[in-house]
């Protein structure tokens, strides 16, 4: 009997060793990504100080490459992240490849993540495409596999003139690819800081060499004051940003319902999610200028690769209240049709109708990770004929991380 008991104990211990660990959300719902106290045990989930098998490196502030001491046999950083955040792993409930939330505590089980899917290859689907958890083809996504690309509007010229392609052009013209000549290496840590940040969803405090959050001296060099760009109205969210060496046991994130907040820090109109995004999309000015009830759209000069050259480019107003809209018809406020907007601070209004004080920002229309929106007709360049296009005619740009099919994001508000 004793021998049988010891066998059971041994089996139980072995199960603990080989079973995948869960990134549980206990005192800090952000799991292992931040909230480190002086006696933290979170480091051990990812690092080994003396026996790390990984060759993955990081770059210090002297531009020197240092080993990240990660507990993985992968040589690619994004694969380390996907060890918890992919379709099959049990380390995290946020499945970013399939684009679904697989838990119950911080969102609706099996509902779509508000960031959308990056996509993954399915054995029952063509291998040249990637799909979300429900088998829908991902039509556009930010790169996250360590490849390099230039952001739309990511520089004075907005494209790289050294790269040419004829793919998808029914006229057979050689078309310059969008992006900037100064390519950005795109992986999970291009946008997120696995050790935490002052921002919502651990978005980095500096991206593409631009400050988009951070910490300032507060008299205690070990505990500086956070200065976030991006905050949330989720219950218990620290609107002043995440401070170092603190946990937030009352914070309840929601990964399936957006509850973005209007930034409250100094210079709010240049911050928020939009201010964070222009860290890479540098020519996309943020706020429209207003004169009385007249709205002047956001404008800057760059070459979009559409044959028009270096000219003024006009964009939808961002970080402006809906009350600025002065169209012939009122904005749609039906809750079932709404898109996510930024709400005034502390307003717990995720899923509710718009108010005149709400702001439009990048994630009102776009997903941060990927989109399964379908593009047809004039929204799909690959199906158009030369007659459709005419002389410098309709030149659609695909799904571009849009939340809805074709350009339904426009109709959701403007109701034409």
Image (cartoon, rainbow, N blue to C red):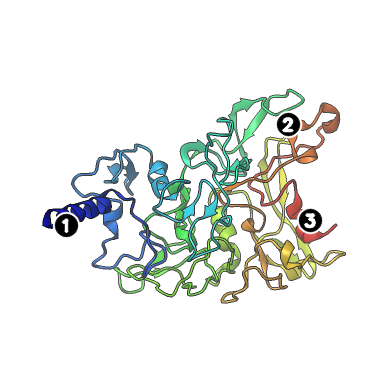
* Disc 3 versus disc 1: nearer the observer: 1
Residue that mark 1 sits on = 5
x and y, in percent, of residue 333 in the image: 76, 68
Measuring 70% from the left and 29% from the top, which residue is drawn there? 168
Q: Nearer the viewer, residue 360 or 248?
A: 248
Q: Earlier in the sequence, mark 1 or mark 2?
A: 1
Query: In the picture provided, is 237 more to the left or to the right than 335?
Result: left
- Helix, strand, or loop for circle 1? helix
Residue 323: name its quadrant: bottom right
Q: Quadrant of the image for the C terminus?
A: bottom right
Give the Cα separation between the discs numbered 3 and 1: 67 Å
* Disc 1 versus disc 2: nearer the observer: 1
Q: Which of marks 3 and 1 is nearer the N terminus?
A: 1
x and y, in percent, of residue 160 in the image: 59, 33
Residue that mark 2 sits on = 382
Image height check: is 202 above or below 124? below
Residue that mark 3 sits on = 411
């Amino acid at each position: 009997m004793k021998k049988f008991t010891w066998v059971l104990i041994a089996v139980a211990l072995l199960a603990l060793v080989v079973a995948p660990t869960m990134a549980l959300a206990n005192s800090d719902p952000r799991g292992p990504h931040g909230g480190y106290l002086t006696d933290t045990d979170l480091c051990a989930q990812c690092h080994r100080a003396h026996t790390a098998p990984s060759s993955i490196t990081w770059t210090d502030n002297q531009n020197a490459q240092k080993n990240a001491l990660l507990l993985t046999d992968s040589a690619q950083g994004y694969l380390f992240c996907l060890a918890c955040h992919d379709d099959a792993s049990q380390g995290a409930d946020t499945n970013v490849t399939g684009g679904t939330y697989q838990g119950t505590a911080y969102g609706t089980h099996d509902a779509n993540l508000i960031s959308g899917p990056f996509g993954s290859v399915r054995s029952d689907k063509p291998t040249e495409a990637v799909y979300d958890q429900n088998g829908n083809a991902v039509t556009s996504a930010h790169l996250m596999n360590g490849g390099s690309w230039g952001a739309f509007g990511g520089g004075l010229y907005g494209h790289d003139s050294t790269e040419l392609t004829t793919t998808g052009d029914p006229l057979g013209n050689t078309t310059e690819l969008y992006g900037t000549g100064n390519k950005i290496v795109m992986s999970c840590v291009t946008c997120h800081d696995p050790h935490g940040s002052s921002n919502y969803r651990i978005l980095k405090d500096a991206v593409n060499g631009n400050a988009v959050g951070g910490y300032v001296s507060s008299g205690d060099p070990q505990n500086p004051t956070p200065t976030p760009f991006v905050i949330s109205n989720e219950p218990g969210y620290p609107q002043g940003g995440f401070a170092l060496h603190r946990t937030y046991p009352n914070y309840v994130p929601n990964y399936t319902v957006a509850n973005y907040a209007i930034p409250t820090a100094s210079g709010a109109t240049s911050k928020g999610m939009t201010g964070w995004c222009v860290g890479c999309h540098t020519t996309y000015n943020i706020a429209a200028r207003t004169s009385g009830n007249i709205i002047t759209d956001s404008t800057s000069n760059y070459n979009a690769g559409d044959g028009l050259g270096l000219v003024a480019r006009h964009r939808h107003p961002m970080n402006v209240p809906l009350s600025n809209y002065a169209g012939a018809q009122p904005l749609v406020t039906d809750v079932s049709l709404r898109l996510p907007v930024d709400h005034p601070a502390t307003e717990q209004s995720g899923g509710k109708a718009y108010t005149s004080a709400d702001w439009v920002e990048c994630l009102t229309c776009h997903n941060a990770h990927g989109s399964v929106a379908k593009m047809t007709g004039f929204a799909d360049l690959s199906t158009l004929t030369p007659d459709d296009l005419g002389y410098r005619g309709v030149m659609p740009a695909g799904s571009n991380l849009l939340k809805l099919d074709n350009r339904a994001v426009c109709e959701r508000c403007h109701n034409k």
